[in-house]
Amino acid sequence: LTPAPFLFVQSQHEHCCPFPFSALQRTVSTRGWILSRERSDRAGAMQLHFWCAADDGAFEIIVDERAVCFIARDTPVQNAPERRQLDLTTPDGKPVDALYFDSWQRYSNFVRSARALGITLYESDVRPADRYLMERFLTGPVQVSGPCTERDGIRRYYNPRLKPADHGASLRVLSLDIETDYRSDQLLSIAGVLYRDGQVLSEQVMLVSEAPVVTAEGLVCDCVPDERRLLQAFLRWLGELDPDVLVGWNVIGFDLRVLAERCARHRLPFAAGRGGSTALVLPARDSGPVTVQIPGRVVIDGIEALRASFHQFESFALDHVAGELLGRHKLIGAQENKAEEILRQYREAPAALAAYNLEDCRLVREIFLHADLLAFCFERARLTGLAPGRHGGSVAAFDFLYLPRLHRAGYVAPDAEPQRQGGLASPGGYVMESQPGLYKNVLVLDFKSLYPSIIRTFLIDPKNLWAVKNDPTLPAVDGFEGARFARRAPILPELIETLWQTRDEAKQAKNAAMSQAVKIIMNSFYGVLGASACRFYNPALTCSITLRGHEIIQQTRDLIENDGHKVIYGDTDSVFVWLHDIDDAAAARREGERLAQTLNHWWQRQLRQSRQLQSHLEIEFETLFTRFLMPTMRGSATGSKKRYAGLTDDRKLVIKGLESVRTDWTPLAREFQRELLERVFYERPYHDYIRETVAAMLAGKEDARLRYRKRIRQPLSSYVRNVPPHIQAARLLPEAGRRIDYLMTTDGPQPLSMLSAAPDYEHYRERQLQPVADTVLHFLGENFDDIVSGQQGFF
């Protein structure tokens, strides 16, 4: 790939090396994986610092670099820094100059002043370290060649040559967990498990204790007399282990935050970075998360990594996730008062607390291995160029991939406008009116990655939208809302094609982590273009994607119905087809394959003949439901949306949007509906089951499954006029957390830990069991009340 037109590589200067050049300096070539990126000003010059992991130990890269932004050539500035004409233009076709700054401080002062004066700059918000990497297409693994020094066991490369490499990383990972006195955040113990390639290398627990502590397994704990020495012992141990990655459960928002705060209290530097460098834990801003910067180390939070890889759980508490994935639980159960039990164990059974602390580290390690989270995070980093520990960041990932290609196409991009009002300024996915009923043999035909396919097929691209606006005579493809896209050299469709090929290769290589990472980044592009904080935000772009999707789904429905079948529902990228004249499952599957092939051929022919476009739309026969329920909206004859249940031909029960998969319904109602659906789908008796469930509840045998669990999203004091039941229950607690478990009792909602009245069984009968039962029974000509009372069939 050709260099970007504005790349400015400053010559090497001796001042960039913190140590005098000596005989230890040599020219070396090696490979590594970029873990962290920092920026500093030293002696009036900006430097970039990249720490890399390698099989033979970590090393640091130090680069002299200039900060750069762009400005229209006809825009004057006072006290201009170095200014150079470039063969690039703004989105509206004006030629631009590059502005270069030796110092980050001078650069940030200039940008701030220019914005205050209303001067338009381009890409002034791109961080220098990110720009350095993206313009060289460096995303993770790198080949490094250049002068190297070594001091105190640390190798440093100064202004080396860097180029992309293709290798994996064998990383040293530390699973970290702390235990504290919940009343003061004072540290009680710190535990860690170091592992590499899944194999445990070291385990340790450090405790504040005057007496020696040995766990039941025989692990001798490192005991110190006070918190200050505990922190010193931990930082010394961390330096000796020298992990590449820190993992944990809420490890940034709790463990590292508390460690940093306790170090500050004792006036100790939080020297958790490589080479004894100080780590920064930055407080949450604007309701965002706590963030951390540890030079030379990646930090990955298990909760956020699971969410980023689209794992779903009723609760992301460690005990619950470990139970779901591993069949194991924490050593202090969820039913106990964990905070008080930790203090009791610390006073009375410190060996038990040490075992509890260490077991949490082990559970996190095993969850990371089970879900392949480390591979997912690093494969995503290889794709996007973002740091492996950064979750979310879809807009930043799009910039990393798109901007260097945009520059080589002759354009610069505007600054992002994070304060811009609005979100996705386009219609959402097309959702058909459903045809409620209880069906046999329903096919689901699904467009594979519909929105990325639309972008590829219809050449939707920010740069080519600008190109046609600047030159309306260019051959173009019509979009929506006045958008037209040039046909020549689109960036985004070609980028998606590359990612698509990468995913196919990953599937062939059985690299599930890479395949999932590619899928997520490809499917994020539509949302990024519609996000108001994106520098390419333009409603015409997103409308040209979603409205094209509407057109495709509706045309596909018409084609299917003209073929003699009935489409009973459609949602964004799928259609549900009732084969009313086919009873045999094998014949239904054959019809599904035939329909998919016929539709794909039709779209290829239609787009080639009518628009001279190559179709990348691909519809797949995804599922055959031998029994299928499409319910009505509650209290209405109108069909519902995004709610259905079905039994596949391989006997798997699939439920979407119904009460049995919603965490705001009680466990009793959820399990009741699931069992009732199975009985109806399998054509098994269900009357006695309904009556027995109600009788057991009224007899008090189901009290353990009557709890509600709700999130508390706002301060309790903010609820004034309408106070929902979970807030009423939370106000009875001395201190409420972010979630509340409560029951509806004869005295109103009460927290589970402070029950003083019996459950209101009539509430659960009318508000939980009856609604979920009637969702199904309605289509069988029956109702819950008649079955429970024994009156069904009398009229």
Image: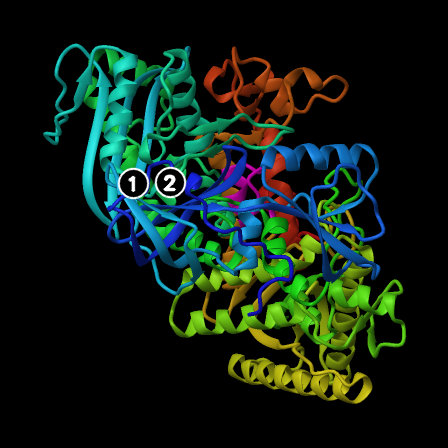
Where does residue 742 sit, x and y in percent of width and height? 53, 24
Q: Where the N terminus falls, by quadrant? A: bottom right
Q: Which residue is drawn at 50% across and 13% down?
A: 756
Residues 120 and 396: in front is 120
The label number, if any, that marks residue 134 in the structure image: none
773 is within the stretch colored magenta: no
Count the marks. 2
Where does residue 289 sit, x and y in percent of width and height? 55, 32
662 is within the stretch colored magenta: yes
The correct choice, above or below, for 384 with respect to 420 in the image is: below
Q: Are marks 1 and 2 in contact (CB under 8 Å)?
A: yes
The correct choice, above or below, for 532 with respect to 111 in the image is: below
Instruction: Give the residue number, with chain letter if any, for mark 2.
Output: 297
Where does residue 620 sit, x and y in percent of width and height? 59, 76
Instruction: Give the residue number, with chain letter if any, for mark 1.
Output: 243
Determine crowd level at label 1: few under 14, some 14-19, many 20+ residues with C-alpha closer than 10 A. many
- Element at badge 2? loop
Residue stretch rendered in magenta on the structure? 657-673
Q: Which residue is drawn at 47% across and 33% down?
A: 292
Determine crowd level at label 2: few under 14, some 14-19, many 20+ residues with C-alpha closer than 10 A. many
| Scheme by which the image is coloured | rainbow
Occupied quadrant, residue 451:
bottom right
Q: In this view, does 274 lie to the left or right of 457?
A: left
Q: In this view, does 480 lie to the left or right of 504?
A: right
